[in-house]
Amino acid sequence: LASARAAARPVEAVRIATGTQGLVYEPLFLFNPETLKLDPWLAERGEWGADNKTFTATLRQGVTWSDGKDLTAEDVKYTTELGKIKAVPFSNLWTYLSGVEAVDKRTVRYTFSDPRVQEFENFLYDRMILPKHIWESRSEQDISTHKSEKPIGTGPYVYQTHAQDRMVWKKRDGWWAEKALSLEVKPTYIVDIVNSSN
């Protein structure tokens, strides 16, 4: 989706963008298969405590949702705490995570009852962050079954239209990574054709 303008810097890790994942919603980090490490994305850095009992993530400045509101630590905390709902696919996170705290607007601290570094790092790059101000009024049942027809995300695309056989996404003006990472999204539109099978 994006090409790096800054040739002196290694190209950021890439995820497969499928519908809202990657196009609309984004994770805190990306997994880099060349280095086998996490590259900062919505977070500018992350750090394990000395005993691996805590992990602290610092969010980038200037990241906004497509409705213009700022991404904050409360959004990350809210997304993480959705895992307390049994129907949410990452509910197993709370078998080893004891708490998540929004320390300030840009800092999130996770505390572990059982530090599982690799499992948690999988969560960091696999979990898309949701906007608390959009989702917090929904019931548990609504969260697990709701169709979000016009999703609000931090990603490079916004919902344009859809039909029975396609979703159409439009390039978003002012995507945060254009300035922060010197990335440029090329296609103005992405048309995702629905395939019922292979």
Image: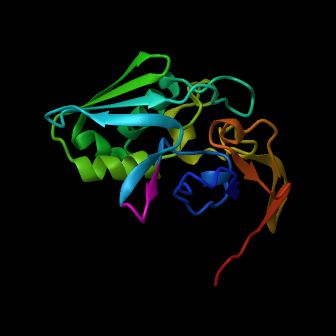
Residue extending farthest to the bottom is 198
* Residue 159 located left or right of residue 4: right
**Which image quadrant: the C terminus?**
bottom right
Q: Is residue 3 above or below residue 54?
A: below
Q: Is residue 137 magenta?
A: no
Residue extending farthest to the top is 104
User: 103 and 185: which one is in front?
Assistant: 185
**Which image quadrant: the N terminus?**
bottom right
Over which residues does the magenta segment extend?
30-35
Q: Position of residue 84 (x, y in %)?
A: 36, 36
Q: Position of residue 27 (x, y in %)?
A: 51, 45
Q: How is the image coloured?
A: rainbow
* Residue 92 located left or right of residue 191: left
Q: Is residue 89 visible?
A: no
User: 148 and 56: which one is in front?
Assistant: 56
Q: Measuring 16% from the left and 32% from the top, which residue is drawn there?
A: 50
Q: Measuring 16% from the left and 35% from the top, which residue is drawn there?
A: 113
- Number of numbered discs: 0
* Residue 114 located left or right of residue 169: left
User: 90 and 2: which one is in front?
Assistant: 2
Q: Measuring 62% from the left and 42% from the top, which residue is drawn there?
A: 181
Q: Measuring 44% from the left and 56% from the top, which residue is drawn there?
A: 31
* Residue 156 located left or right of residue 88: right
Q: Position of residue 185 (x, y in %)?
A: 76, 52
Q: Is residue 55 above or below residue 186?
A: above
Q: Position of residue 33 (x, y in %)?
A: 42, 65
Q: Is residue 185 visible?
A: yes
> What is the quadrant of residue 72 in the picture?
top right
